[in-house]
């Protein structure tokens, strides 16, 4: 029997494999900005969302069977599933064989491929000098020691999430006014000397 598998399924529900699934991520970028998604007819768009939910809920590829889709509320008379699968070829793939083994092997292959493509992109905390140099480059003076200590004591967490981009956090400090606007271009040493006089 053939099954439908969503490519890159992990991006719609990262982690939480040990819990009951109650949600999935649907990105505005996917709905509004992806030209391929925008070109799909309304039926195929919402079927894609439903296919994501079904595969996440059952944690295995979905049987490519008209009776199955009828039971799930799909109107096969309006548009056949084979045509939907053809239109969604960039986002779904048809796999053959036992659905349990398909799910495991396809998921493991996708994870392996994604890791190879992206490499290991783990967050590396910045040094005091890096923070101060970057803040100067955006024409703002932030005390690098305060910045690093502030996030170090929180385990580099932002709210409940691990920090991903420290430069974005520096920009947030600038936006919130937690530093001084730099007048002209000064070196880090000059900025440190100025802070020590204060």
Image (tube, helix red, strand yellow):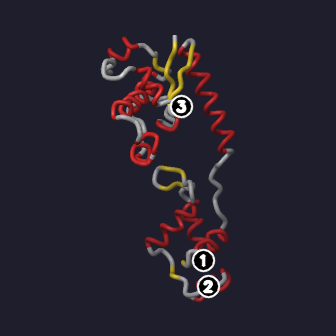
Near-viewer residue (171 or 190): 171
Question: Label 3, on which residue?
Answer: 7
Gap between marks 3 and 1, in whole Å? Answer: 43 Å
Lower sequence index among marks 2 and 3: 3
Where residue 60 sits: x, y (%)?
50, 21
Whole-percent x and y of residue 82? 44, 20
- Mark 1 Cα shell of 10 Å, populated few (<14), some (14-19), many (≥20): many
Q: Residue furthest bottom?
A: 197
Along the polypeptide, which appears first: circle 2 or circle 1? 1
Tell me where residue 133 sits by quadrant: bottom right
Q: Is residue 116 left or right of residue 97?
A: right
- Image depth: mark 2 or mark 3 in front: 3
For marks 3 and 1 on the same chain, the one whose residue lies earlier in the sequence: 3
Q: In the rendered image of this protein, does residue 32 appear above or below residue 99? A: below
Q: Are marks 2 and 1 in contact (CB under 8 Å)?
A: yes
Q: Which residue is mark 1?
A: 136
**Residue positioned 58% across, 87% down in the render:** 184
Relative height, residue 134 to residue 156 (above, below): below
């Amino acid at each position: 029997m053939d099954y439908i598998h969503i490519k890159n399924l992990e991006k719609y529900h990262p982690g939480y494999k040990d819990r009951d699934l109650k949600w999935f991520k649907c990105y505005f970028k996917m709905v509004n900005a992806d030209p391929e998604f925008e070109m799909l007819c309304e039926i195929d768009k919402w079927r894609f969302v439903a296919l994501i939910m079904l595969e996440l809920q059952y944690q295995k590829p979905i049987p490519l069977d008209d009776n199955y889709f009828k039971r799930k509320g799909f109107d096969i008379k309006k548009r056949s599933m084979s045509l939907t699968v053809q239109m969604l070829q960039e986002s779904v793939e048809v796999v053959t064989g036992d659905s349990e083994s398909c799910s495991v092997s396809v998921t493991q292959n996708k994870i392996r491929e994604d890791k190879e493509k992206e490499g290991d992109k783990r967050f590396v905390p910045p040094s005091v000098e890096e923070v101060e140099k970057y803040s100067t480059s955006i024409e703002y003076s932030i005390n690098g020691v305060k910045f690093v200590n502030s996030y170090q004591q929180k385990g580099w967490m932002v709210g409940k999430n691990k920090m991903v981009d420290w430069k974005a956090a520096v920009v947030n400090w600038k936006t919130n006014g937690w530093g001084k606007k730099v007048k002209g271009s000064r070196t880090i040493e000059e900025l440190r000397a100025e802070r020590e006089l204060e």
